Image (cartoon, rainbow, N blue to C red):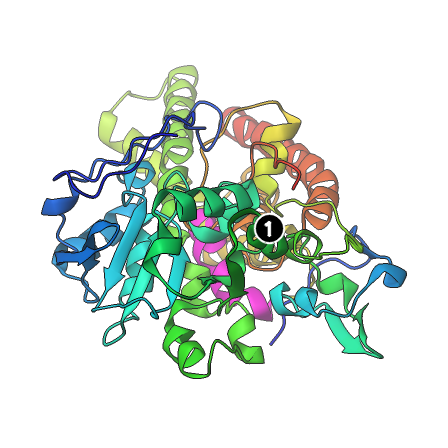
Amino acid sequence: MSKASHKGIKLQVVDDRPLTPCCPGEQPAVSPVNISEANWVVGQLETNTGPVYRVATALDRSDLWGAVKARWGVGRMNYTVPPGLYAIGAPDENAAVLVSANYKLSFDSLRRELSGLNLWLLVLDTNGINVWCAAGKGSFGTAEVARMVGRTGLARLVSHRTLILPQLAAPGVAAHEVRRRCGFNVVYGPVRAADLPAFLRAGNKADAAMRRPSFTLRDRLVLTPLELTSLIKPLSGFALFLFLLNLSAALLKGNPLALLPLLGHTIDHLVPFVVAVLVGAVLVPALLPYLPGRALAWKGLVLGVLWAFAYTALTPGAESWLRNTAHFLIIPSITAFIGLNFTGSTTYTSLSGVIKETKIAFPLIAMAAGLGLIALVAAYFV
Amino acid sequence: MKYRYLKNVVTLQMDQGKCSGCGMCLEVCPQQVFTYAENVSWITDRDACMECSACARNCPRQAIKVRQGVGCAYAVLMDRFKLKGICCKDACRCSLDNIPDP
């Protein structure tokens, strides 16, 4: 294993361990950050293991802009911090050691809570993935913790033998194994970084509330932009499909081919489906605790049926029975599918539950959507 | 408020005879599945379990068994249809690749 150097200008950690990509087909995240020029570095600390970069505890404009971009999926796969040891304030040999992931959003949400504290921050190489996700995959794991403790010479830097890990890293890290491998005791800190100062003040004790992940309105909606951006492509394809249907219907019926009326019809016909996407991606997460049932596809279905009724009521007599049938089949399929997809964004769904839900819901959704599409096509030519 | 997912589906199992009563499972569980009584841990809210496997991985006696996984329909569908998908990085607990054993 090659040794990480804090002495060079660039703290690009050299590593002979193969970088395993997060998912098949994805490029491994290589940190593009030149650390000495990073906006979040505020000086260096001389230590007996070499210089350690000191990290700012306030976020600046570029951090906030980076967060916005990541939430909308821009450069999200490369938003990383170089793994290694960092300092918060002016830590000494007795200062606590916090361990975190090298996803820049995770790193930012941690350091912003640490102002006024003196701590060591050990950033693992989690391929730029957040704590929870990385722990689930094992990249925030026992081996990585032990490896980084060894590589940074932490045992020579601090006199104690305690690492504070985020509680959500526990699916990947075996505390008793870490102690066996590198001699450090793992203490699981609070779920939220905001509770860290209180946790440290209480002598590394978390109360019950600190151990529960929150899933507030804000938490539920934070992934909506990403969901919406991923739906732009299929929605554009669907818009093109509707345009071609309008075009062929006009051709068959011998109507004059004027572009503007064709586009107007296409937009009119697209509205109920665009709203359905918004209902699924915004209202389902927003209203999650108040929607009936436990399965998320079911919650989506309920809202979709309501929207289909509302649309029919808003456009009385305007649509043919075939088009209304198509709406009642396709709209709930869209909202149920987006609801089903939301399982991955929640803090409480189990794989066994999701497998059961998907097995039942997905074939029904596919069938309803298929029949709905047939009715929709027929509506143009009958 | 506690969110509730489907009933009677999770794979969480515990061998109480092996439990040393260290309480680690109570500490790491994000869903408060366990309670502590008579010097050992008890599964008292199995349906709340999200199969993250934090308890099993941190049990020094291997008293707990659970199939570790991420409750994400996207990943389940991608797996079912043998497709490659992009991984969500920030909030989704995506696990499109397999998780190594401890």
Q: Main secondary structure of the magenta part?
A: helix
Q: Quadrant of the C terminus of chain A?
A: top right
Q: Quadrant of the N terminus of chain A?
A: top left
Residue A278 location (% of width, % of height): 42, 52
A81 over A107 or under it: above or below: above
Residue A151 location (% of width, % of height): 37, 42
Q: Residues within 10 Å of mark 1 (few under 14, many from 20)?
A: few
A261 left or right, relative to A280: left
Q: Nearer the viewer, residue A125 or A328?
A: A125
Q: How many numbered circles does the render carry? A: 1
Range of residues picked out in magenta = A276-291
Residue at the image point whose x is 54% and y is 50% from the top? A342
A361 left or right, relative to A281: right
- Can residue A276 be spotted in the picture? yes
Please state which amino acid type lies under the numbered disc 1. Arg
Residue A229 location (% of width, % of height): 35, 41
Disc 1: which residue: A180
Subunit ID for the residue under disc 1: A
- Does A288 appear in magenta? yes
Residue at the image point whose x is 31% and y is 46% from the top? A84
Q: Nearer the viewer, residue A158 or A286?
A: A158
Residue at the image point whose x is 61% and y is 42% from the top? B73
Residue A129 location (% of width, % of height): 41, 44
Q: Nearer the viewer, residue A148 or A306?
A: A148
